[in-house]
Image (cartoon, rainbow, N blue to C red):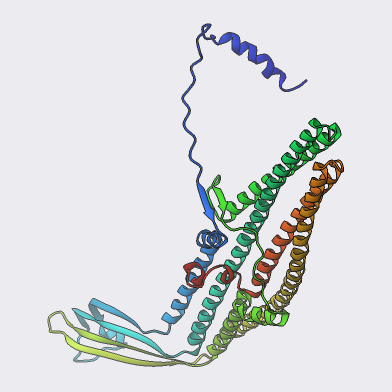
Amino acid sequence: MLRSTPLALGVPLVTLLCPSPARGQAPIQAPTAPPAPVRTVSLSLAQALRTALDQSPRVQQSLLAIAESGDERRSAAAALMPTVAAEALGQRNKYNLEAQMGMSVPGFPKEVGPYNWSRTGLEAQVSLFDLSLWKKWRASQHGEDSARAQGRAVREEVAAIVVGQYLRALRAAASVQAGESRVELAEALAKLAENQQKQGVGTKLDTLRSQVQLQTERQRLIQAQTQRATALAGLGRALSLEPGTRIELTDALATPALPATGFQESFAASLAQRPELAALEAREKAAANMQEAAQALRLPTLVASGFYGSAGLESHPSTRTYQVTVGLRVPLFTGGLVSAQVSRAKSEQSRVQEARREVRSQVGFEIQVAQAELDAAAHEVEVANLAVALSTEALSQARHRFEAGVSNNIEVINAQDELAKANDSQISALYRLNQSRADLARATGRLENMYLPQDHPAASAR
């Protein structure tokens, strides 16, 4: 039995129980709120990139990580700085001299006090020599450098996502524009076939073929419009925009300026510019400093402390007092603490070195692939442009032959299909050219710099 049967049986029952409006009386409708206006945002690729870098949660998290590493550096530096504190002390004392001395002394009282005394002043302490603290501070500096480089890597990743999504939206928009032009052309050719049939030059079959081609072009246009809507929604998601925001693209899919560098130049630039490599290099330096800091725990440390203030009994005036102390501490046995910390630092160094080797190899692979894709896409664009020009000329010739009654419109239909394929190939080639150019810039670590001017805050936040 279908589950919808009780619902179907319940509808007449509700109708019988609820009073119906009088005949001729219009039902009362609840007022509806006006639809909210749709927000429209016009974005170029540079504007989209700025928006993403300003609003991306990943970028904000990387900024917090940089701030935390700065706090760690300041904490490590504070251990090397002097500490100063104010002190105010008051005591009431009473002593048993016999108990403290362990004997009774003739002529001396058995007890002293009670009496009150107080002391006020400043006390300070500073580390004169502690190589371990110094190396830890250096390690924290390199840790902050690593966090900053990792922040640049996050920005490059976000930029790659936004640029790729924007280029996909441009490709979809170009497909819609080409589809609209083909629909207009198909409508004109269908009208021409109808006129040819009315004049006795064409046949009913020519008219039917042109109508079928028109519907085919309309279907392609619907698919292109759907892909454009999907691509724009993905772009809005990448930019963290409010759902439902309408995005208008101000850039167009065109042939960009291509870099003239080869593999060796690009690979050398990537070794100097890739933030991932810079982050790993800073981590390796930090691990080396931590190893030296652990080894320095075996060395003596020298600390100076002092007090300056006033002290005195409650019934007497206070007297200026001071105290200066210099202490030397020599570790003799640490219970394996030093060897454990040295081993941990060496493991971190080895791990970072292996990661650098892997990233270096990955960078070379990315540059090779992007360079090959860029060269191939550049040739594809040239071939696709020529194919579009030839297909357009072939369609024009077929249309003239059909208008003159020399042939039927089979040649026109075939030429329309060839033009549609050429348009799609041209758009795909332009997209691959722009995407491979962005991939090459990403592989060399300069994707953000390629699309944003250096004086913009989003480009200079490093």
Residue 162 appears in the picture as rendered: yes
Q: Position of residue 258 (x, y in %)?
A: 67, 72
Front residue of this view, candidates 186 and 309: 186
Which residue: 73% across, 23% down? 3
* Residue name at image x 67 percent, y 82 percent: 268
Residue shown at the point (72%, 57%) measured from the top left? 427
Residue 159 as seen in the image, left or right of residue 366:
left
Say which of 36 and 186 sits in front: 186
The front one of 250 and 391 is 391
Percent position (x, y) of residue 456? 48, 69
Residue 350's place in the image compared with 205, above or below, is below
Q: Quadrant of the N terminus?
A: top right
Q: Residue 217's quadrant in the figure? A: top right
338 left or right, relative to 361: left
> Where is residue 29 shown, x and y percent of the image?
49, 20
Is any part of residue 417 visible from this angle? no
Pinpoint residue 2: horizontal percent, then vertical percent: 76, 22
The one nearer the camera, 149 or 99, is: 149
